[in-house]
Structures are given as C-alpha cells and as structure tokens.
Amino acid sequence: MAPRADLLRLAAVADALLLLLATGLVVFYAPADAVQGVVQKIFYLHVPAAIAAYMAFAVVLVGGLVYLWNESPAADRLARAAAEVGLVLTTVTLVMGSIWAKPIWGTYWVPWDARLVSTLVLWLIYAGYLLMRRIATPGRQAARFGAVVGIVGFIDVPIVHFSVTWWRTIHPPIETAAPGALPPAMLLTFAISSLAVLLLAAVLIGYRYRLEALRERLAAALDR
C-alpha cells in the first residue's frame, strides 16, 4: 500500500519547518569551531546526509530480503525508491565532504583514504543498481537480481562507517559526532539537523514510492 498523500504532505510541511530551524541554528546559534572556523559548519549537513544514506540503503536491504522471501511488488518498489534517495544523499555526502576537505586538508580528495574510497564504492554500487533496474526489462528476474545486488551492496555500509577505526585514515573518527564530544550548542544543532535530514529522506522515499506505483499502474493500463 502506498503512503497516504495527506500524510506525506503533512510530513513534508513539518520537515520544511525543521529544515528552516536547522538552517537558523547552523547559521546563527552553533558556534564556529575553534580550530577549523566557519567551514566546520558543513558538518551539520555532511554527517546527517551520510546517516540518512545509511538509513535509505537499509530500506533497500529490507526491501530486497522481503522480495526474495515473498516476491512482494511493494517491497521491490520500496527498494527502488530508497536506492534513488540513498544515492542522492551519498552524493551530497561526497560533495560536502570534498568542499570541507579543501581548506582543512588542502585538497578536495585523498585517493588513499579508506573512508573516502569506501564511500565512493558505495555510490558506485547503488548507481550500478539503479542503472541495472533502468535498462533491464521489468519483471521477476530483474527484481530478483536487483534484490540480490541491494542486499550484497549493503555490506559496504558498515565498511564505510567503521573504516576510520579499522584502517589508518585522515578522516575524523566516529567519536567526533558523539554526544560527549560536542558542546551543547553544537550537539543540539547536530540533533535537529539530523532529524530534519532523516525526515526529508523518509518523505522523498514516500513520494518516490508513490510515483513508482503510479507508473506501474499506468504501464499496466497501457498494456491492456
């Protein structure tokens, strides 16, 4: 069953207000970092976008597992919608990270850094997933293969997350965003920003799911 349009509209309005609040907190309330200065405020989009991308790819994982279990068209539809949103969020993560890196590291990209490389691999996996779904003939075989790719691709998510712990890297450690590591003003701003981006991801997935459902109904009607 597709998400109700009225609930999606309500969630979209609520998220618009949250995004405005988060923007105000980032610009006017959160203090500039003592070492990195104002550029550190990219953190409030960079990290929430990465967390939301993890969530979206987890939805792809669950959708794929459910489809392989009972071949539910709704599960496959949800996985496709979540993969698109997750890819957009991963793109935001990579772009914001590169912009942040330039004044801090002196370069936009460090080719040997485990976090950067594993995140790029994650982007390539789900870009490949979406490309495959785009060019493959719709049907059971494409859906099953897509489910397998979505499930296997999720293996890279914990690799991305723990890469700064498992390997030598110049990327800040996971603990940088932990509650005890941030002053109260920064922690509040980070929490609101994360909530806003997570809700945005959920709303986008909901709308993409509805669009996929409408597209499938239209295709079925045209085939009659």
Image (spheres, helix red, strand yellow):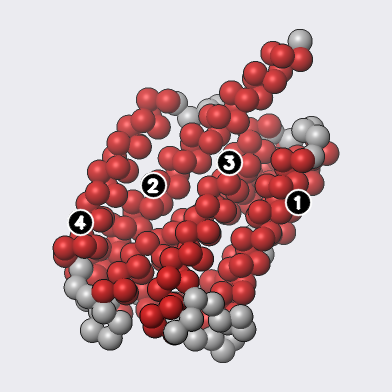
Instruction: Say which mark, if any, is on residue 148.
Output: 1
In what element is the residue under mark 4? helix
| Residue 9 position within the rendered picture, expressed as x and y whole percent measured from the top left | 36, 30
Q: Nearer the viewer, residue 96 or 5?
A: 96
Q: Amino acid at mark 1?
A: Val
Write down the residue under mark 2: 199
Residue 194 vertical placement versus 79 (above, below)? below
Res. 173 visible in picture: no
Q: Are marks 2 and 4 in contact (CB under 8 Å)?
A: no
Residue at image position (32%, 32%) is 10
Q: Amino acid at mark 2?
A: Leu
Residue at image position (68%, 59%) is 125
Q: Are marks 2 and 1 in contact (CB under 8 Å)?
A: no
Instruction: Tell me which numbered mark, 2 or 1, is placed earlier along the sequence.
Output: 1
Q: Residue furthest top?
A: 224
In what element is the residue under mark 2? helix
Write down the residue under mark 3: 81
- The local crowd at label 1, few if under 14, some if 14 to 19, many if 20 or more residues have their Cα within 10 Å, is some
Q: Are marks 1 and 4 in contact (CB under 8 Å)?
A: no
Cα separation, mark 3 vs mark 1, equals 16 Å
Res. 23 visible in picture: yes
Write down the residue under mark 4: 24
Residue 34 vertical placement versus 89 (above, below)? below
Q: Amino acid at mark 3?
A: Ala
| Residue 34 position within the rendered picture, expressed as x and y whole percent measured from the top left | 23, 84
Residue 125 vertical placement versus 39 (above, below)? above
Q: Amino acid at mark 4?
A: Gly
Mark 1 or 4: the one toward you: 4
Cα separation, mark 4 vs mark 3, equals 30 Å
Q: Residue furthest left?
A: 28
Instruction: Tell me which numbered mark, 3 or 1, is placed earlier along the sequence.
Output: 3
Instruction: Tell me which numbered mark, 4 or 3, is placed earlier along the sequence.
Output: 4
